[in-house]
Image: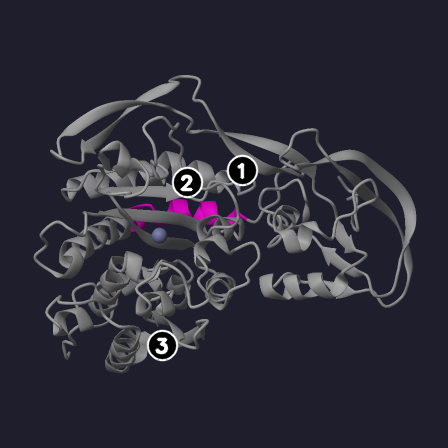
Amino acid sequence: MKWIKTPLEQNGFQRYSSSDEIAGFLHTLAATAGRFARLDRIGYSAHGREILAVCCSAHSENPGMALQKLRVMLVGSQHGASEAAGCEALLHLARAILTGELQHLLEKFEFIIIPNANPDGRERDSSKNGNDVNINRDFVLLSQPESCALDTAVLRYQPAVVLDMHESAVLKRKTLGVEGYLTDFEAQFDIASHPAISENLQNYAESQLLPALIAAVETRGLRAQRYIREITSTKQPVTHGDLTMRIFRNKAGLRGALAILLETPMEPKADHHPTFRNIAVRMEKQWCCLQALLQVLQSQQPAILSAVARATQLPPQGNIALNGFYVPRNESPVTRINLRRRDTREIESIEFADHRAIAAHDFLQLPKAYIVQAHTDVFAELFERHRIPFDTVTEPFEAVLESDVFAYGDSSERILRVLDTSRDRAVVMPGHLYVPLLPDTARLLPLLLDPRSSSSVFQYPQFTQLITVHQPFFIARTPDQDR
Ligand SMILES: [Zn+2]
């Protein structure tokens, strides 16, 4: 089969691939691969560039086999040119799967490869999209076309596994760098970890997947660890990643996928690098982690399929936590982490408070449905963006409705708390929105709609202003009588 050079190989690693070159490469690759590949346009960027997904699958002769295949979605460079290596590694992977040495993987896997998730950011030499928004903080509002495209792709393809590929500069010029330190890591992985995500899925990911993944990367010669959130000061406590639905990983996890974050480092730009911004070395690190992941997914396929199959089952007691917060680890309240001196590059072991335990907060008994009684146009549009099914009520009907009454607490932070909850028989009027809790949305809908949730739309001013304190909240719940 014809060997097609990636754009990076064509330019001799002298600059990043452009969004046009990436699209051109994917078209040529898909045409060459014939029946193994389909190129889908999953959306357009803010500036109108195509966002492409290469779908790779080999149809099995034995139809029973097809059901056993693991569908894996790989997403590169959400943060544009600032984190370019994920995309470049995925072009490499797509070629190896479709026309090269990894074609045999199609016996066990189907792949949805989205190398260039933020094509505007790549062209603007930025981490943000064409509207200057960080798309990986936009999965609650879905205000940007790129985040919408990724969220919809998770629904459309229903992958069992989602990998979100990032990079991080070891020099934080304005924060840790000022204290004279660089971070020191080679590869880190996190999992979706909002406490509302299926316990089965989280237990599997934490106790089986992560240890195997870290070991597989280390066997390949890179040091690997569970993700530690960006260290901006030697005085801060250490935690894992963001616990809200604003980020892609947690949103995909709440939709029932086994979602994984990969992050590899970028050395200071001012250092001497053999290739443009050291892209060859950076790509190699991402490539190494991809191979380790594929090896682990192969060996743990039955466990993954079983954890994912149970991910949309409702929790046994019918309640979920609206929030998760990092708290000190009881067993080891402090930890030591290696940093590098910025001047000498020597390793120094530094003590940090260890806040890597997650405490679940603000439990909610899952209702049967939500009733939106005001601002219905705003919420109808929100539900459409999230692909959350709802009905507009046409005939009035009576139901028991629960409504919270909110007030601001005494602190200056303007955090809403529940003052009271009313429970009455009331009439649901024509024009109101009836939003049933379905298995696919039961874990994310309360997070989106409950003002107490740090993942809710009410964290954003345009929604906060819709709440009238000391009055029953305009989104009521119909209690689930069966529980
Ligand atoms: Zn990133």
**Residue 304 drawn in magenta:** yes
* Whole-percent x, y for residue 344 in the image: 11, 33
Label 1: how many Cα within 10 Å (few below 14, some 14–19, many 20+):
many
User: For mark 2, what is the residue?
Assistant: 241
Q: Kindly identify the amino acid type of the residue bearing the numbered disc 3.
A: Arg
Depth check, mark 3 against mark 2: the one in front is: 2
Give coordinates of residue 277: x percent, y percent.
17, 57
Near-viewer residue (56 or 385): 385
Marks 3 and 1 close (CB-CB < 8 Å):
no
Above or below 121: residue 39: below
**Image x and y of residue 267, in percent:** 18, 47
Instruction: Give the extent of the magenta segment.
Output: 297-311
Nearer to me, 240 or 159: 240
> Image quadrant for the C terminus?
top right
Q: Earlier in the sequence, mark 1 or mark 2?
A: 1
Query: What's the distance in space between the residues labelled 1 and 2, CA to CA?
Result: 13 Å
Q: Which residue is mark 3?
A: 38
Left or right of 195? Residue 117 is left
Of discs 3 and 1, which sits in the foreground? 1
- Residue for badge 1: 195
Q: CA distance from mark 3 to mark 2?
A: 34 Å
